[in-house]
Amino acid sequence: MKLASTKNSFISYLTLFSSAGTLICCALPALLVSVGLGAVLAGLANNVPGLIWISEHKLQVFIFAAVMLSLNGVWLYLNRNAPCPIDPNLRDACIRGRKFSARVYAVSVVIFLVGIFFAFIAPNL
């Protein structure tokens, strides 16, 4: 049970961070420029060189995030009816863990969709 819980947490957090990478590459620069903070973006790009790399490889970042979201979605779906321990404390922790994983997944999907909008849809408007 502990190994499955650790795997689920790892996949959930990796999904969250990969979808956050989509925001960093596309939504953050668009937001800063749209509110007139282009100089802040230039300073940020100068001090965080990884930001430029992520922006240059945005298609790969989005593909990786989509794969991670898909894996996490399948993992959550397959384990939605998995048995929890009989002990009331462990059962409650199991149920809370499932709800937390579902919330993290939902937040990750929203972040991913916002990133897709700013990376691929907004530039064409």
Image (tube, rainbow, N blue to C red):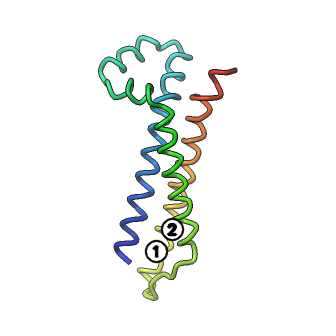
For residue 98, which numbered disc appears in the image? 2
* Position above or below: 97 against 116: below
Whether tag 2 and tag 1 are in contact, CB under 8 A, the answer is yes
For residue 94, which numbered disc appears in the image? 1
- Which one is nearer the viewer's eye here, 67 or 69? 67
| SS under mark 2 | helix
Residue located farthest toward the right when viewing the structure as drawn: 125
Amino acid tagged 1: Cys
* Position above or below: 75 against 54: below
- Which one is nearer the viewer's eye here, 90 or 124? 124
3D distance between C-alphas at marks 2 and 1: 6 Å
Q: Is residue 53 left or right of residue 20?
A: left
- The residue under the point 58% across, 67% down is 77
| SS under mark 1 | helix
Q: Quadrant of residue 122?
A: top right
The image quadrant where one finds the C terminus is: top right
Amino acid tagged 2: Arg
Q: Position of residue 12 (x, y in %)?
A: 45, 57
